[in-house]
Amino acid sequence: MTSSSILVLGAGELGMAVLHALADLAAPRGTRIAVLLRPASLQSAAASTLAERGIERVPGDLLNDSLSTLAGIFAPFDTVICCTGFAAGPGTQLKLARAAIEAGVRRYVPWQFGVDYDVIGRGSPQDTFDEQLDVRDLLRAQQGTQWLIISTGMFTSFLFEPSFGVVDLAQNSVHALGGWDTAVTVTTPEDIGRLTAQIVFAQPPLANQVVFTAGDTLSYGQLADTVDAALGIQLKREPWPVPMLLDELAKDPDDNLKKYRAVFAQGNGVAWDPAVTFNVRHQIAVTDVAAWIRQHLKAPATNR
C-alpha cells in the first residue's frame, strides 16, 4: 500500500505539526497532501501558510456535516489522519471512523494520540476514553479499511500546565499523580508530527497495529529531579495519591482536569518502555523532558 493522497482532519497544534512534517516528506514522493478546514478558516493566515507548502485546503465541518457528507469528502484519499481531538465533542470520533469506513479509504489514522486505551479499559475516571475504545472496536471488526493507531502519551507541555497542577513554577511546587514512582510517557507535538509522517510513509507499510512513540518516559520523582537540575531550583514536593484524586473528582464529577489527574495517577496504560517505540527502533532523535525544559522554561525570579 502506498499513500499517494493524504487528508488531515484539523489544523490545531498537532494538526499543523503533522501537516508540515508530511509536506517535508511528500514532495519527493509526489504525494498529495490536503487538510480539512471549516469554511470560515479557509482564508486564515495559518491556512495560507499551508497553501504555500503545497497543501490543499478542503472545506468541511467535522461536527456538523453528516456522516455521508464526510464520507464523500474522504473518499478521494488513500489515507485520512484525524488530528482533531476531544474538543470536537462526544460521538465525533466514532462518526469520523464510520465515515472513513463508508468512504472506503485505504487506511485511517484515528485521533488516538495519547494513552494506551486497551490497557486502561472501560469505565476509567476519564469517561471520554470509552469512545476511543469504541473506535478501536469498530476498526478492528471490519476489513475494508486498514487502520493505524499512534500512541504518544501526554503532550510534554501538559506536565508544565499550571492548571493541571503537576509542575507549577509560579507556586514552586511539583505534585506526583499517584506517587513518586508512578510513571508517565510524554512526546512533544513537533515530534509527534515528525514521527507520524515517518510512520505513515514507512516501508514496508504499517497497518492494523498500534505504534508507540515516546519523547520520554519517567516517574514523577524523576520529573521533579529533572526540573530541579535543569533550572537550578528546589521545588516543594507533594504527592497526590489516587484516593485523594478520586475523592476530588467525586465532588466535582464534570471537571475534566480532575478526570485526567485521576486516570494518570492510576498509572495503567499511561507509560511504556521507550525500547518498544518507533523512534527508538528507528534511531530517530526526539526531545526528552530535560531538553524541553531547557528550550521553554526559566526559573522563577524568586528562585534564582
Image (cartoon, rainbow, N blue to C red):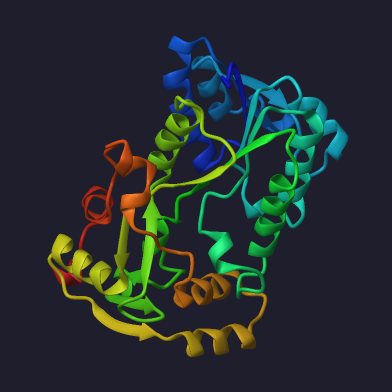
Which residue is pictured at 27% across the width and 56% down the height?
Answer: 289
Position of residue 146 in the picture relative to residue 272 (left or right): right
Can you say whether 115 is above or below 29 in the image? below
Q: Quadrant of residue 80?
A: top right
Can you say whether 75 is above or below 128 in the image? above
Which residue is pictured at 32% across the width and 59% down the height?
Answer: 217
| Residue 251 is at least partly visible in this image | yes
Q: Quadrant of the C terminus?
A: bottom left
| Residue 300 is at least partly visible in this image | no
Q: Quadrant of the N terminus?
A: top right
Q: Position of residue 131 (x, y in %)?
A: 70, 59
Q: Position of residue 142 (x, y in %)?
A: 75, 42
Residue sitting nearer the eye, 38 or 56: 56
Q: Position of residue 290 (x, y in %)?
A: 22, 55
Can you say whether 299 is above or below 149 in the image? below
Q: Quadrant of residue 226?
A: bottom left
Position of residue 200 in the picture relative to residue 144 (left or right): left
Q: Position of residue 64 (x, y in %)?
A: 82, 42
What is the tally of numbered marks visible in this picture?
A: 0
Position of residue 298 in the picture relative to residue 36 (left or right): left
Which residue is pictured at 52% across the width and 77% down the height?
Answer: 262
